[in-house]
């Protein structure tokens, strides 16, 4: 049997109904826009009437008669004034419009979701901030959280971004383990994946937890505004340091808070140790240091990995050598040790003769050693001297001889670092993801923030001597010969490279010739006594 079509009125009825609803909604919106002033005035008149009724109800009965008389007199005066009724009507409409305007609702407290999160944090802290013998505990199960959390702020997702906690005086806030338990708990309950800073006020029994913004990664290698002897290691939080340097970032020129490392005879941290994970940016940091050191000094680079990360520096003015093999590295480090001794003796002779130190002893010499553990393993297999043993003289006497040593190593080989490297590198940097225990083992103190598991290259922590632990973001200094390097970063690094020399110094044995006026390396101070002026009275005391 053939199916009969539906009547036209039934098939097109839904479309007509939807169209009618749309027309009605549009008409209602238009009417609301047109009548909005009238609606506002009407709402204001209603509020004014409610206010007058409330005031009349609050007026005592014995004062109602005089009040009525005063109102009637005012109305009579307004009626007899020229344009009085018109002015009174305009004033009334203006007051009604002001009273009936729509006001934005200002939230003065947390919403239900935020209250539930604060209650959860409060209950989680009860076992740590309460004891059974407390007669008036601040933290109790089911207690009032408002007395413990005096300040709080949340982000758009409802997670706390700032929390000020008052804790009882008997809490052992002077013990690192007790602090670590509270910080770990707050980090877990407030949301992972963010970096938190914890400021403990032991005197006032207050703890402030705040979420730190990510450090900018848009600052590339460039000429920083510094004086000779200053090196910009990276950039940190604005409230952590007192100095800013103008930089060119992706969004224009700005003043960025910089971590400045000072070297030279008056430096208390003359040498640097960098430890990180693979791909964390340790090589980029050494490349950045080399580019900043070349305008004022000479650089020798020893690359244990042999990956050619420093090939762009080969043959440049001021670069004495870029060694990747074991034999060249040993020869270069042996020359550096003799050069340090020669500088000490030459400066001491000039000082005893009443003359200034020779020019060749005042030009800074930088020794950058990347991955010494690999070279040490090769040397042990070949029965030769560990390259780190040749660093003892530059590390011990480098500050007085204008010799700076920078050592970079990875966490998995950090235990192979020699005692001399550990003792004399008082400036420390940790790059890449690491546990708080690993950071504390390298820097000598734990960070005041919670490290995140995923960080960009060049992100980490720095500590200069006995100073505070600072967050750090190294300026982007990639290998310009790497195909993965962006064109902007490649051009930035190439612009900083010095001109190439006509003839490249191939071996470390020719380094003495590059120095120019430098004579043959002087023997060590422990050799036969020199008939001339006496050598240094005592070696420079070791730092740390």
Image (spheres, helix red, strand yellow):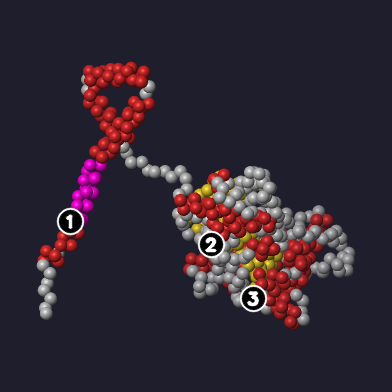
Q: Secondary structure at mark 1?
A: helix
Q: Earlier in the sequence, mark 3 or mark 2?
A: 2
Image point (70%, 54%), residue name? 175
Q: Quadrant of residue 533?
A: bottom right
Q: Quadrant of residue 458?
A: bottom right
Q: Nearer the viewer, residue 329 or 156?
A: 156
Image point (14%, 66%), residue name? 11
Magenta stretch, residue numbers: 20-37
Which of the two marks, 2 or 1, is nearer to us in this view? 1
Q: Earlier in the sequence, mark 3 or mark 1?
A: 1
Within 10 Å of disc 1 (Cα), the crowding (few <14, some 14-19, many 20+) is few
Left or right: where 536 falls relative to 288: right
Name the residue tied to disc 3.
305
Q: Is residue 455 visible?
A: yes
Which of the two marks, 3 or 2, is nearer to us in this view? 2
Q: Position of residue 539 (x, y in %)?
A: 82, 61
Mark 3 → mark 1, Cα distance in angstroms: 77 Å
Does 242 appear in magenta?
no
Q: Nearer the viewer, residue 148 or 440?
A: 148
Q: Secondary structure at mark 3?
A: loop
């Amino acid at each position: 049997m053939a199916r009969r079509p539906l009547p036209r009125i039934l098939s097109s009825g839904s479309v007509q109904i939807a169209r009618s609803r749309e027309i009605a909604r549009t008409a209602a919106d238009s009417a609301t826009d047109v009548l909005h002033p009238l609606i506002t005035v009407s709402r204001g008149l209603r509020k004014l009437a409610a206010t007058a009724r409330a005031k009349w109800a609050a007026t005592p009965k014995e004062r109602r008669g005089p009040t009525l008389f005063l109102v009637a007199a005012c109305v009579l005066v307004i009626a007899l004034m020229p344009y009085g009724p018109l002015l009174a009507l305009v004033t009334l409409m203006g007051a009604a419009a002001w009273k009936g305007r729509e006001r934005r609702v200002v939230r003065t407290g947390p919403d239900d979701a935020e209250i539930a999160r604060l209650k959860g944090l409060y209950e989680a802290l009860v076992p740590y901030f309460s004891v059974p013998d407390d007669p008036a505990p601040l933290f109790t199960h089911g207690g009032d959280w408002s007395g413990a959390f005096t300040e709080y702020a949340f982000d758009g997702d409802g997670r706390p971004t700032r929390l000020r906690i008052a804790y009882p005086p008997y809490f052992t806030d002077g013990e690192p383990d007790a602090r670590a338990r509270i910080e770990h708990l707050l980090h877990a309950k407030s949301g992972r994946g963010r970096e938190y800073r914890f400021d403990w006020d032991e005197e006032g029994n207050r703890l402030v937890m705040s979420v730190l913004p990510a450090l900018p990664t848009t600052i590339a290698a460039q000429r920083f505004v510094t004086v000779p002897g200053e090196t910009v290691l990276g950039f940190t939080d604005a409230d952590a340091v007192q100095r800013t340097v103008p930089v060119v970032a992706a969004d224009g020129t700005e003043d960025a808070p910089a971590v400045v490392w000072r070297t030279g005879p008056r430096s208390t941290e003359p040498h640097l140790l960098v430890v990180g994970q693979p791909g964390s940016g340790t090589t980029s940091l050494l490349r950045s240091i080399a580019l900043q050191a070349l305008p004022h000094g000479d650089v020798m680079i020893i690359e244990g990995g042999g990956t050619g990360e420093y090939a762009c520096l080969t043959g440049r003015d001021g670069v004495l050598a870029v060694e990747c093999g074991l034999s060249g590295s040993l020869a270069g480090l042996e020359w550096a040790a003799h050069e340090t001794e020669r500088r000490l003796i030459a400066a001491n002779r000039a000082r005893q003769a009443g003359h200034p130190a020779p020019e060749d002893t005042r030009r800074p010499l930088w020794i950058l050693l990347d991955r010494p553990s690999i070279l040490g393993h090769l040397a042990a297999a070949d029965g030769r001297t560990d390259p780190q043993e040749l660093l003892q003289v530059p590390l011990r006497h480098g500050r007085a001889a204008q010799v700076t040593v920078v050592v970079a190593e990875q966490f998995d080989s950090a235990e192979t670092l020699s005692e001399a490297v550990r003792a004399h590198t008082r400036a420390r940097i940790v790059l890449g993801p690491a546990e708080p225990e690993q950071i504390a083992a390298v820097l000598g103190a734990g960070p005041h923030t919670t490290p995140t598991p995923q960080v960009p290259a060049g992100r980490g922590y720095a500590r200069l001597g006995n100073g505070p632990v600072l967050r750090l973001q190294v300026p982007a200094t990639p290998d310009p010969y790497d195909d993965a390097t962006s064109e902007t970063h490649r051009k930035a690094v190439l612009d900083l490279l010095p001109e190439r020399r006509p003839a490249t110094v191939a071996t470390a044995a020719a380094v003495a010739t590059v120095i120019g006026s430098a004579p043959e390396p002087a023997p060590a101070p422990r050799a036969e006594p020199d008939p001339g002026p006496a050598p240094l009275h005592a070696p420079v005391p070791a730092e740390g």
